[in-house]
């Protein structure tokens, strides 16, 4: 199991030395050369005798803590990457499902469009047939109208002719009646002369 990270640099004070006593006065007031000299003295004390062994142990402890911290971070990073991969896989599956649904919708729309085109073609064919029938009916109506006009004109001429013939018949009848009266009168006159 991963080890909880610990703060680096929390080792115990060196045995026999204790915590170094702060120099008198403020360090900020010392010149740079004095600070460098004091740092060199402290390093030489730490690297001499038991202090060197303790420093080595401290360094190893620090290195161990650093390795454990890096392992823990690597494990956490691995878990985060695994969680991210799981999230990415789930997101990919969701997108694939949505894409499949959209493909089905597109397929349905294509089928509906094909049906609509077929229906429109049938309607267009019916409209063309109706237009042709209307043109034919118009032509027949014009022909019948022309024929009816011709028949009406012929009937009018026949009626005029019939009226003329009736007038002629009436005239002939009158002439016949007049001639018949005149013939009777002549017969009557010839009889009296005999």
Image (cartoon, grey):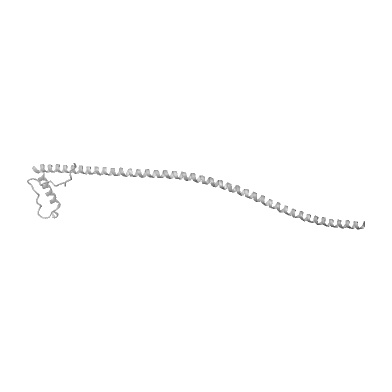
Q: In which quarter of the image is residue 180?
A: bottom right
Residue most extreme to the left: 16
The picture places residue 111, in percent across and down from the top left corner, at: 44, 43
Report which quarter residue 182 is drawn in.
bottom right
For residue 163, side relative to residue 77 (left or right):
right
Q: Residue furthest right?
A: 194
Q: Which residue is drawn at 90% across and 56% down?
A: 191
Front residue of this view, candidates 5 and 155: 155
Q: In which quarter of the image is the N terminus?
A: top left
Using the image as rendered, state which of residue 164 and residue 75 is in the foreground. Answer: 164
- Image mark count: 0
* Left or right of residue 43, residue 115 in this image: right
Which residue shows up at 24% across the image and 43% down it?
A: 79
Give the quarter of the figure containing the C terminus: bottom right
Query: Looking at the image, which is closer to me, 193 or 177?
Result: 193
| 77 with respect to 18 (left or right) | right
Residue 51: image location, x then y, percent? 9, 44
Question: Residue 84 versus residue 146: which sits nearer the camera?
Answer: 146
Q: Residue at x 65, y 49 (%)?
A: 144
In the image, residue 132 lies at what x, y percent? 58, 46
Q: Where is residue 123 in the image (x, y as percent from the top left)?
A: 52, 46
Measuring 80% from the left and 55% from the top, which residue is drawn there? 173
């Amino acid at each position: 199991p991963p080890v909880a990270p610990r703060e680096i640099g929390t080792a115990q004070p060196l045995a026999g030395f204790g915590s170094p006593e702060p120099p008198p006065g403020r360090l900020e007031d010392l010149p740079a050369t004095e600070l460098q000299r004091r740092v060199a003295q402290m390093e030489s004390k730490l690297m001499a005798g038991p202090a060197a062994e303790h420093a080595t142990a401290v360094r190893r402890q620090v290195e161990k803590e650093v390795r454990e911290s890096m392992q823990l971070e690597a494990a956490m990073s691995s878990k985060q990457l695994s969680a991210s991969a799981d999230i990415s896989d789930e997101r990919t599956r969701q997108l694939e499902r949505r894409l499949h649904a959209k493909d089905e919708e597109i397929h349905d729309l294509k089928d509906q469009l094909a049906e609509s085109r077929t229906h429109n073609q049938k309607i267009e064919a019916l409209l063309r047939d109706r237009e042709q029938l209307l043109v034919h009916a118009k032509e027949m109506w014009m022909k019948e109208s022309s024929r009816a006009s011709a028949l009406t004109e012929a009937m009018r001429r026949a009626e005029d002719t019939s009226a003329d013939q009736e007038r002629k018949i009436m005239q002939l009848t009158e002439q016949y009646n007049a001639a018949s009266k005149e013939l009777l009168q002549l017969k009557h006159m010839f009889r009296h002369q005999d």
